[in-house]
Amino acid sequence: KSLMSPILSRAEKKSASLGVGSIEKQWASLAAFVGIPLPGTGAWTGAMGAFLLGMPTAIALSSIFTGVCGAGCIMASITLAGKKGGIAALAALALITGAEFFGKKDGEK
């Protein structure tokens, strides 16, 4: 506990300035974060995020459970779709990523 104390206190200070919204917004944000099936966005990371945000345990657990079920459904549907489904999912991810990188700049409207 003493080993992680400086890291957790620094993370707590940084997350305090985020201005977290209502419990409903926190629940939806955490479920969406956990539900994205990418490395580093799973239940363990979601639990750490919920702790840093100071979410009540019951609400955090239900949000994480919903996100894990959502990620499982996404991965099952891609798997059941076979090679064509995997290629389609990869193409969709590439389009979304390309739009984010090559889209509007921060100052543009």
Image: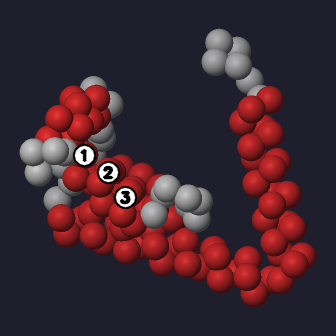
Query: In the image, what residue occupies the spot 48% across and 57% down?
Result: 41
Q: Is residue 20 left or right of residue 6?
A: right
Residue 53: which disc? 1
Q: Secondary structure at mark 2?
A: helix
Q: Can you say whether 4 is above or below 44 in the image?
A: above
Residue 6: image quadrant is top left
Residue 49: which disc? 2
Query: In the image, what residue occupies the spot 74% across and 43% down?
Result: 97
- Residue wearing tag 3: 46
Mark 1: which amino acid? Leu
Mark 2: which amino acid? Gly
| Residue found farthest to the right | 84
Asked whether the viewer can see residue 79, the reply is yes
Q: CA distance from mark 2 to mark 1?
A: 6 Å
| Image coords of residue 19 (percent x, y) | 29, 31
Quadrant in which the C terminus appears: top right
| Residue found farthest to the front | 3
Q: Is residue 64 left or right of residue 95?
A: left
| Image coords of residue 95 (percent x, y) | 82, 48
| Image coords of residue 59 (percent x, y) | 24, 65
Residue 108: image quadrant is top right
Dot 3 surroundings within 10 Å: few (below 14), some, or many (20 or more)?
Answer: many
Q: Can you say whether 107 is above or below 79 in the image?
A: above
